[in-house]
Amino acid sequence: MVIIFTSAAIWGTGRNSYVRLLTEKAAAERPIPKDWVYANNFKNYRTPLALGFEHGEGKNFIKSVDFIVDFLRKEVESVFSGKEYENAKAAILTEYTGKTQGIIEALNEIGEKYGFKFGQNERGLISIPLRNGLPMTEDEYKSITDEEYDLMKENSGKLSIETADIFNQLRDEEEQYRANIKELDDSMGRRIASFHLMTLREKYADNQSVITYFDYLVDDIVENLDNFKNEEEPDSKNPLAMFAPRNPESFFERYKLNLFVDNSETTTAPVVFASNPNYANLLGSIEYKNEMGVLRTDFTMIKPGALHQANGGYLILLAKDILSMPYAWKSLKRALLDENISIDTSGAQAGSIVSMTLNPQPIPLDVKIVLIGDQYTYQLLYYYDEEFRKLFKIMADFDIEMERNEDNIYKITQFIAKHCEEDHLKPFSKCAVAKIIEFSSRVADDQKKLSSHLNKLVDVLYEAESWAEKEESELVMAEHVDKALWALNRRNNKVEEKVLEMFNSGDYLLDVSGYKVGEINGLAVLGSGQYKFGKPSKITVSTYLGRSGLINIEREARTSGAIHDKGVMIISGYIGHMFAQTKPISINASIVFEQLYSGVDGDSASSTELYAILSSIANLPINQSIAVTGSVNQRGEIQPIGGVNEKIEGFFKICKMKGLTGDQGVIIPHQNVKNLMLSQEVIESVKAGQFHIYSVAHVSEGIEILMGKKAGKSLKGGGFTKGSVFDLVDTKLAELAEVPRHNKKKTKPAVKKEKAAEKKAVVDENITPDKASK
């Protein structure tokens, strides 16, 4: 079994189509599976027989059996009314009559002694009283006296005792006669049925289940010969006919066959996609019909499920669908473990009351299951479902992007051409195809990648074609693709428009020119359905004397996520690593995203916050024309972030709205350069020098861009390059900590004062280390 998962629950990546393509290709190399027929089990009707045939033979078998049964209905009646049967039956009757005549003569000899004679009528053998040696008439019998009646009664009792053994002998002869007639009928019926089934027996001699069915069929025909002899319909005018036994025609339904799985039209092994895998649709069902208020069923009402249809081939399932269906997942695992498919009506009919049900013979199972889902579902099943680990051993992690190379570009081109052909779209020009390729890379957020989210590409194809149709163009051109992308964004950017209006009206405070201390423009990404856009935010920092360290106001207000809090802690680690090696940091720094009320998460603003903190400590202004994004580690190295295109374009729109000065730009991590797939408007502005994009690998590079001053380097003797930003920060922190600079010697009074403080802290156990250091 194979399980296909993506790293996230993303639809439209082509997983289903690709899986179908692969399975259909593999199915072409597998043999066509069997046909399956359910037949009546005449020995136990509650357990229908499952008969397997080579593909295409199921229909032929049913036609052959139906023909033979129809022929036998005429043949049996003809044979049992023929001369051969009548002669054989007459011979048995003659023999029986001869034996019974001798017995009756013996009875009469004894009966004459008691005044009786034996005779036969429609009720059988009876004793008749005699008078003067002749049978007594009815009038004579009524006129007898009481004395004669008592005597006759006494003689009758004696006669019964004396002839008891002879009567037993007569009954034995009668039973033997009936047995002989039954044996004759059975012999004739079996001979006829076996003769007409002989050809089929030879054809399916290697199929033991079919041979067993033929044996049961012949036995049932022999046992029900009366139904073959008499085909009279019940009187339809009889008002009680509805309560009478079922008509002979309905009796012959027992010989019908249920073509359960028919592969006569298939050319390869089946590939089945189960879109609604509930219990009945997956493992089959037994239907019921209402007969006078009672639910009944039979073997002809057994219906196959997707597992039966896919038997011998491939079954594709969506994990979220089958896991949400009661009984389905557990029953599927049971079928795979048992290697056969059993239709259990208790699961499908939970809560229902039926008067009759079936337990069909299970069908051997040979199927490959492909389960499609997301990574979260896979982890749950793998760790909490032991049977899942046993059954689904092959896991394929389906990527949502692919390399942008010639081969994949060609495949995307083929994909476009195929859709145009299948859906009767106008052909796309080379430039239009190139636009689609660029859009695919934009969706993937990588210049060297293509998105496998093919549904997004298809949507653009349809819309671009509609623009070409509107303009009566024979080809879909690049401008039509541009219009489609513009319309796609226009329909989804209402939130962005509202945000831009608030920036334009001054409701959102943001400077895109000038210099300010402790203020910087950060960048975030907001999402609205399938549309994402960048939103600049002003980040401010206030630093002052204290020992609380960095105060994340967002965290204190519980509007920040864990990752953002982690980013702030990393900033604290960086500052400690850089400036607290020889002195404590006695400073409080409060950080806040101004006018942000919906919460913030992620660490993409950690470098931005660090720049603002250093600016506030060193009292150096930051260029407000430049916005910043990028996370930072404890060594000051800049790390990549997501949504870089949306962030750049978001700040560009604000700058354009407020007026481009030629100084504005964005600082991004150098690793994100490969992710740049910007709009043509931004690209043209960068080319014209109206907007700038800076890539940095370290905090020191960003400092020089933002503050126009060298960041500085660490010196061997301690400290930093004189006059650099780091030197100004280090000097300020030293002043706040009231510790002399590393390049100045401590005075003797200062040393004595420190030793006295340490001695006092050791002596006074009630003084905490914090109080001692102060």
Image: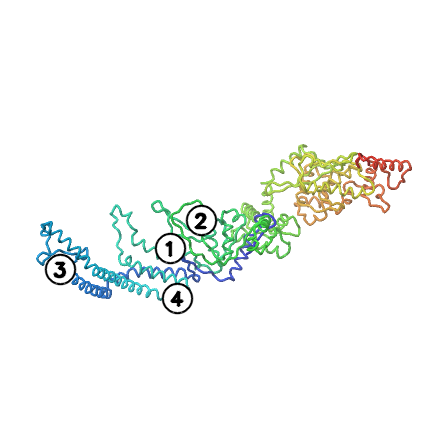
Cβ–Cβ under 8 Å for marks 3 and 1: no
Q: Which residue is mark 2?
A: 346
Which label's residue is closer to the chain start, 2 or 3? 3
Distance between the alpha carbons at the discs numbered 3 and 1: 58 Å
Q: Which residue is mark 1?
A: 45
Q: Which residue is mark 4?
A: 203
Q: Position of residue 152 (x, y in %)?
A: 13, 54
Among all residues in the image, which is located at the extreme bottom?
202
Distance between the alpha carbons at the discs numbered 3 and 4: 69 Å
Would you place residue 287 above or below residue 518 in this image?
A: below
Amino acid identity at mark 4: Lys
In what quadrant of the picture does the N terminus appear?
bottom right
Which label's residue is closer to the chain start, 3 or 4? 3
Which label's residue is closer to the chain start, 4 or 1? 1
Distance between the alpha carbons at the discs numbered 4 and 1: 26 Å
Amino acid identity at mark 3: Lys
Q: Are there few (<14), some (14-19), or many (20+) residues within 10 Å of tag 3? A: few
Which one is nearer the viewer's eye here, 314 or 78? 78
Q: Secondary structure at mark 3?
A: helix
Q: Which residue is mark 3?
A: 113
Q: Secondary structure at mark 4?
A: helix
